Amino acid sequence: MTSNLFRQILQRPTGVLCAALLAVLYLIAIFAAVISPYAPSDQNLAKTYHPPTGLVWHDGRLCVRVYKLVDPTEALYRAEPDRLAPVHFWAKSAPYKLWGFIPMEHRLFGVDSAERIYLLGSDSTGRDVFSRLLYGSQVSLSIGLIGIFITTVIGVTVGGLSGYFGGPLDNVTMRLTELLMAVPDLYLIIALRAALSAYFDSGQIFLLIVGILSFIGWSGTARVIRGLTLSLRNRPFIHAAEALGQTPFVILWKHLFPNLLGYLIVTSTLSIPGYILGEAALSFLGIGIQEPSTSWGLMLSQAQDMKVFMLNFWWLLTPGLAIFVTVILFNALGDVLRDIVDPKLKTQV
């Protein structure tokens, strides 16, 4: 079924475009440390709120313009007409570890250490926004995949067992899911995060947010899976499996789960944006990812300074654009998958 689904996606231009762009985004996130010219915490207080550097072609090579700070009160920079810094590819850099364990001393591109390249400008402490955007994608994009995986596993297990066995187990699990669904998501997320320790390190905060979002999201999946399981429970192939002496867990895995896979793929794709937005909301409110780590939501929270809007430092809002594009791509791909799995749901134009 999965291979057939993939072939049908390739036959639809919207599906191909969305899947390709999402694949590019995740590849960039995976290799963010190599692609970004600087580490996300590298500061340069002499170049705060630096505008995006201009790229020019000079003497047969790519160069960036060098800027001079004209007015520190307004962070006003002017390009020096006679100064250019050549861009070096696979440039030497400070040592770092790719994926936390592979020693590296080169990045995809860079300039001489005396100058700086700011493709998307710098923030209030002179950190490169482009580098932070790439590193932030690792958190913002992975949190959706990990969260939906945990949610799907819990939802399928609870909903499948509830629908298959019924009786007291069904009553207990459904009342629990209704209790969770009755509480407003955002308030429950904030309450859970605020009730836990504020002294976690970055990795622990990431796991905490994943756990909270998964704890919130599994109830809806469990209810739908329970309904689908009930509709399949009395089909002849289930009775045949029971007559052959197969255990309930084997029946759930080999017979029920394949029939639910189409729904799970569609709902997972459409649910991932919710996890991305949930992390962004928590970080924006200051109770999510914390420094020295970075995420798109944290970068947006740091752009709340009135100075950003008064002096038009538009490049600090690029994480919002990244979130918008990612959510649109996932929703569009989810719509394509929905039309493939169930053509009756396709909107007629």
Image (cartoon, helix red, strand yellow):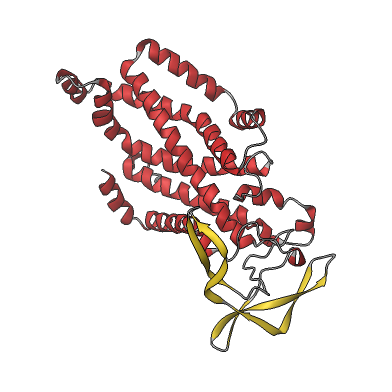
Question: Which residue lies most toward the left here?
Answer: 244
Q: Is residue 61 above or below residue 26?
A: below
Q: Left or right: where does residue 293 sit relative to residue 257?
A: right
Residue 11 pos. (x, y %): 31, 56
Residue at point 49%, 60% (across, down): 103
Vertical arrangement, residue 219 with respect to residue 4, above or below? above
Residue at image point 79% right, 70% down: 76
Q: Residue furthest bottom?
A: 59
Write the residue at 28% across / 24% down.
249
Residue 95 appears in which quarter of the rendering? bottom right
Q: Can residue 278 be seen from the camera position used here?
A: no
Q: Position of residue 324 (x, y in %)?
A: 56, 51
Residue nearer the viewer, 310 or 99:
99
**In which quadrant will I find the N terminus?**
top left
What is the count of numbered marks?
0
Q: Residue at x 19, y 22 (%)?
A: 246
Corner quadrant of residue 70: bottom right
User: Is residue 247 shown above or below 100?
Assistant: above
Q: Locate residue 196 relative to residue 170 in the image: left or right.
A: right
Q: Is residue 230 visible?
A: yes
Q: In terms of depth relative to the viewer, which is nearer, 339 or 267?
A: 267
Residue 81: image location, x then y, percent: 72, 84
> From the viewer's perspective, is 42 left or right of 107?
right
Given residues 146 and 331, the one toward you in this image is 146
